[in-house]
Structure formats: structure tokens, C-alpha cells
Image (spheres, helix red, strand yellow):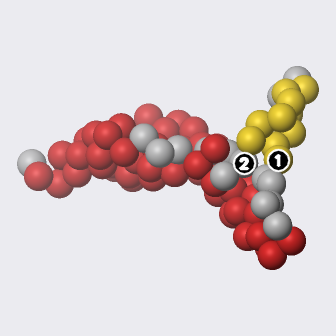
Amino acid sequence: MIDSHGGDVVKFAGDALLALWTAADPDAKTGAVWRAAYCAHERADAVDAASSLQRLRRFARVFPFAGPRASFLAGRIAQIRGRRAQALEHWRSGARPAAR
């Protein structure tokens, strides 16, 4: 995810990492800051979505009508992570009950 936003991973420390976005000249600094901020926001969305998906899947075990929604959310998470084929498969899986 960091690479796709123009950043480089500099160091790992336990469950954390240090990433760096460079700018070739002073005018490019604003763009680097925006890319870093967007990456952080997108990562936070992915973490929130993964947590929500976990809770939704537990709910769907008791209330099966929530299963397709869990599939759609799993597809969105895969899309955020750049896994387009996996996202499409989740979405198809979620749509199958409606086609019956």
C-alpha cells in the first residue's frame, strides 16, 4: 500500500514501521505530504473495515441474512488492498443468494 502511494518502507520495529515520502524539490513537498496522508487514511479505513468484517461474520453465523453483506465488505477490503480479482470473487459470492 505504501509503495502504491509513492512511499518507501525504511524500517520495521515490532508491529510498527517507518515509511518515508521524498520530494525532489521544495514545490513537491506538498504532494508528498498529501500522498502520505492519503496512504495513512486508506490504511486506517482498511483496519476499521477488517474489524467490522470480523464482527459481521460472527453476526452472520447466527443471522444468515447478513452473509451477503459480509461478502460485499470483504470485497471492499480486497479492493482497498489492490486485490481486484479477490474483490470480484467476494462480490460475486455476495450476489449469488439474490440470483436464486
The span from disc 1 to disc 2 (Cα, nearest Å) is 5 Å
Q: Residue at x 64, y 44 (%)?
A: 3
- Mark 1: which amino acid? Leu
Q: Nearer the viewer, residue 53 or 86?
A: 86
Residue at 22%, 51% (x, y): give it. 95
- Circle 1: is it few (<14), some (14-19), or many (20+) Cα within 10 Å? some
Q: Look at 64% across and 54% down and name the residue there.
A: 5
Left or right, residue 45 beside residue 85: right
Q: Provide residue 81's location: percent of width, then percent of height.
A: 52, 44
Q: How many marks?
A: 2
Picture coordinates of residue 28, whole percent (x, y): 77, 70
Question: Which type of secondary structure does the marked residue at label 1 adopt?
Answer: strand
Q: Secondary structure at mark 2?
A: loop
Asked if one can make out residue 75 in the rendered structure from this viewpoint, the answer is yes
Three-letter amino acid code of the residue under disc 2 = Gly
Residue that badge 2 annotates? 7
**Between residues 26 and 51, which one lies in front from this camera angle?**
26
Residue 68, label in figure: none
Mark 1–mark 2 CB contact (< 8 Å): yes
Circle 1 residue? 20
The residue depicted at 72 percent of the width and 48 percent of the height is 7
